[in-house]
Amino acid sequence: MRIVTWNINSVRLRIGHLRRLAELTDADIICLQETKVIDALFPHETINEMGYPHRAVHGMKSYNGVAILSRLPFAEVQTRGWCRRRDCRHIQVTLESGIEVHNFYIPAGGDEPDPAVNDKFAHKLAFLRAMAGWWRGRRDSGAQRIVAGDFNVAPLETDVWSHKQLLKIVSHTPVEVDLLTAMQRAGPWIDAVREIIPPEEKLYSWWSYRTKEWPGSDRGRRLDHVWISEALKPKLNGAEILREVRGWDRPSDHAPVMVTLDL
DNA sequence: ATGGTCGGTGTCCGA
């Protein structure tokens, strides 16, 4: 089973890229973030024709929005609000095999890494704490689970182009990294991509639109993740970040992340 | 220290 996560930054604008990604990866499941469309206007028909008859969507006007596209049918679809808000940042499905797939768009957090003066950063920290509490309350060592999405945190020193220069930049500050790590332990979750690609290797999934010559300067960050439960670890067979997608015409600023499981 | 670029029932806001 191949699962792909991608912050598409408008599913309607980049529907052609999505088709190309589906053909390139032959993915069974695609988790999208920042779809930026209400459910009534989601391009269901086009995506159905791409070979994804099963779709769980949770969108809103202009901002956020998540979707899970699948070749495999769902036994259950759920979504929930976080931090007492109604924004569309989470959707989960249970496959008929019992595997749970969670798709998250964790708040970016704004520019100022101080929760006392920046509500967006405070929201991001609260969101990470809420997720940790939720996982802790749902611990089940036998459960087959995947959590994917745009987490907006680059946890390792090798997940950013310069650890030193990004220590005070939102996405790589110690407080966020510590909360993400605590949330990972709460699962507990295994970082599927770093099981395959050694943590010593630089690895990114996002490059700012503002950076000229992005592939040359390579000032990236690994913000997008696929984590798996302990029970799925023996099935893990591959992981990669599809950097080439960032180079397509009129791209998303994020590259897709793909994980392969032998199921 | 600054400004750079995207997308959206936009001319600001969030990223």
Image: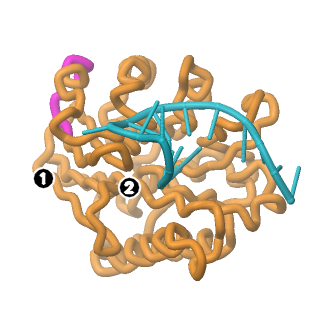
Chain colours: A orange, B cyan
Where disc 1 sits, the SS reads strand
Q: Disc 1 marks which residue?
A: A76
Q: Report which quarter residue A169 is drawn in.
A: bottom right
Gap in Å between the C-alphas at discs 1 and 2? 17 Å
For mark 1, does the 10 Å Cα neighbourhood hold few (<14), some (14 to 19), or many (20 or more) residues?
few
Q: On the picture, is A166 further left or further right than A95? A: right
Q: Quadrant of the N terminus of chain A?
A: top left
The residue lying at 26 percent from left, 19 percent from top is A50
The residue lying at 55 percent from left, 38 percent from top is A254
Q: Chain of mark 2?
A: A
Residue A44, percent from left and from top: 19, 28
Residue A53 falls inside the magenta stretch = yes
Q: Quadrant of the C terminus of chain A?
A: top left
For mark 2, does the 10 Å Cα neighbourhood hold few (<14), some (14 to 19), or many (20 or more) residues?
many
Q: Amino acid at mark 2?
A: Phe
Residue A163, percent from left and from top: 79, 59
The residue lying at 21 percent from left, 59 percent from top is A79
Q: Disc 2 marks which residue?
A: A104
For marks 1 and 2 on the same chain, the one whose residue lies earlier in the sequence:
1
Q: On the picture, is A71 further left or further right than A183? A: left
Q: Amino acid at mark 1?
A: Glu
Q: On the picture, is A240 further left or further right than A127? A: right
